[in-house]
Image (cartoon, grey):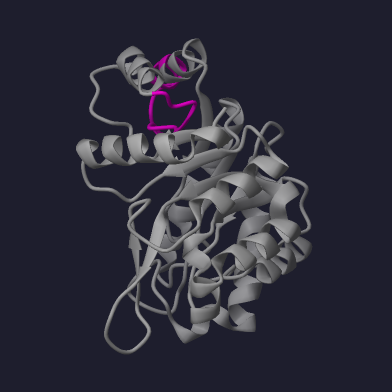
Amino acid sequence: MILGLSSPLSHNNADEWGQKHAELGCKALVFPLNCNNSDEEIDAYVKAAKSNNLTIAEVGVWKNVLAADEKERQEAVNYSIGQLKLADKINAKCCVNIVGTPYGPRWDGGYAGNLTEEAWKMAVDSIQYIIDEAKPVNTKFTIETMPWMIPSSPDEYLRLIEEVNRPEFGVHLDIVNMINCPERYFFNEKFMEDTFDKLGDKILSCHIKDVNLLEGYTFQLKESACGDGHLSLEKYAELANRYNPEMPMIIEHLNTDEEYLASLSYVKDRLKEYLR
């Protein structure tokens, strides 16, 4: 596995960005620009990544391509196509989004409609359209696993792959996002084994973080920094390496550069035997 950060960290230019990540021991990262940036800017960051032997693991979308508002939805779809084209141009491992939802005010929120057959059809149609319009050849489009949205389990991801039926569609794994019940929380090693058994050879990039059971009723889980929860990070790393010794593992959802640097140091020390 190779470590990276979802944060670009504070930097003044592309060269500083690449050098800073390399000096920290990162070997993967998330591309910090988007399809609206100039070719000159994009080329500078790609060059900085290459010169520092950094793998561009992900180009993010993070827009609601299923938004109920037609204007918002179309803008999100167009941006997704642009981001997938960008990922293809720069040879990123994947372009990633979540499915999205038309069923409530939060674009990533949990709603009953998210798990209906209507949602399945909309998700499949949307993914197919984005891939067919972008026509990637060097990368794949992926959907991040989620707790209350397609796909929330490895079996749902397999169904999504089958129904999308495009070779340009792959897997983005956030194992913590699928830990949404007591069984998966308490027996997370078993759940990870099952997930990698089913999806391991299709996974292009992973997020690495932790999850913690809160006291008090009812069942409440909280995402946390690596080491502050119950997840078997060693099992996660072992399984990632089993399927791809160069698997990008991206630390995310921290608030400051200092928090990212502390988490990176912790993960590097704890999982040093698994790192490339």
Identified at 55% across, 34% down, the residue is: 273
Q: Quadrant of residue 221?
A: bottom left
Identified at 41% across, 35% down, the residue is: 269
Q: Is residue 181 left or right of residue 257?
A: right
**Horizontal and vertical percent position of residue 54:** 50, 22
**Horizontal and vertical percent position of residue 179:** 50, 70
**Horizontal and vertical percent position of residue 162:** 78, 63
Q: Quadrant of the N terminus?
A: top right
Does 272 appear above or below 237? above
Toward the viewer: 65 or 95?
95
Q: Is residue 262 left or right of residue 172?
A: left
Toward the viewer: 265 or 94?
265
Q: Quadrant of residue 154?
A: bottom right
Identified at 28% across, 80% down, the residue is: 215
Identified at 55% across, 67% down, the residue is: 188
Does 189 appear above or below 1? below
Toward the viewer: 111 or 77?
111
Tell me, yes or no, whether the highlighted magenta stretch contains residue 3. Answer: no
Q: Quadrant of the C terminus?
A: top right
**Residue 7 in view (yes/no):** no
Tell me, yes or no, whether the highlighted magenta stretch contains residue 43. Answer: yes
Where are the magenta residues, as a range?
A: 25-44
